[in-house]
Amino acid sequence: MITGHFGIAAGVRSQSRAPMGSVLFLALLGAAVLPDAMDALYWVINLCSPYGLYSHTLYAVVLEAAVVGGAVFLLTGSRAVTLMFVVVVLLHSPADFFTGRKLFIPGDDLLGLRFYDRPVLDWLLEVPVAIVGWWMLRRSGRGPRWATSVWALALMVATQTTFDVLSTGQRSLKPNRCAVVSSPADF
């Protein structure tokens, strides 16, 4: 998922009355894509994380949520804000079930519906999730003005559309340092 993660974060934010400024909201959006950011970091440092082993498995996501939650609690002292961050990180992997194919438990089978391989299906899933999250945030009045503007929604839809158009006919646009040979189970 790409923009769908932002929609999920916006939806989670809309449910909390805890005060949150723009910087903290941007951090929440970052937390929504933390496992993907970890994959990018592993790529930069030339570390192979096959099928999201170190970023998207249950154990990795729980660890990421705990670290983020601890840092947010230390910075804000707010249990409500901390809970938002933890929930957003934990919702990353279930959302990715629809778009990708990753390990959920190390050593287990790969799971996922692989909508990335069918960009129209990916767009039909992610854009509505982004729109509903944006709408929930806008209606709640709890988001920054820039995040609830029509321009923010247009940017998310344009970003998702661009990603899906560019990924048509591609195996994956996400960077990966693994020299993993695809097995018949991958197809």
Image (cartoon, helix red, strand yellow):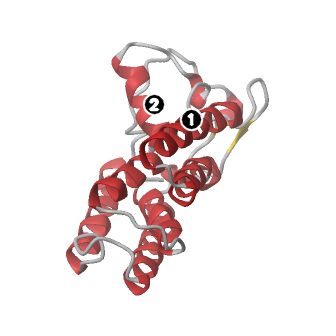
- Left or right, 8 with reference to 157: right
Q: Residue at x 57, y 19 (%)?
A: 181
Q: Between marks 1 and 2, how big is the CA–CA gap? A: 9 Å
- Left or right, 178 with reference to 3: right
Q: Front-most of 53 and 166?
A: 53
Q: Front-most of 78 and 23?
A: 78
Q: CB atoms at circles 1 and 2 under 8 Å apart?
A: yes
Kind of residue at disc 2: Met
Q: Secondary structure at mark 1?
A: helix
Residue 53 placed where, x, y %? 62, 26
Q: Which quadrant holds residue 183?
A: top right
Single out the residue that lies furthest toward the right.
Answer: 108
Q: Which quadrant holds the C terminus?
A: top right
Q: Secondary structure at mark 2?
A: helix
Crowd rating for badge 2 (residues with CA inside 10 Å; few <14, some 14–19, many 20+): some
Q: Residue at x 36, y 49 (%)?
A: 27
Q: How many marks?
A: 2
- Left or right, 62 with reference to 118: right
Q: Front-most of 88 and 79?
A: 79
Residue 158 placed where, x, y %? 26, 65
Single out the residue that lies furthest toward the front.
Answer: 77
Height in image: 7 above or below 168? below
Height in image: 56 above or below 28? above
Q: Which residue is mark 1?
A: 64
Residue 178 placed where, x, y %? 49, 17
Point out the tag, 1 or 2, that comes first from the N-terminus: 2
Label drawn at residue 38: 2
Q: Front-most of 186 and 14?
A: 14
Q: Which quadrant holds residue 154?
A: bottom left
Kind of residue at disc 1: Glu
Q: Residue at x 66, y 38 (%)?
A: 62
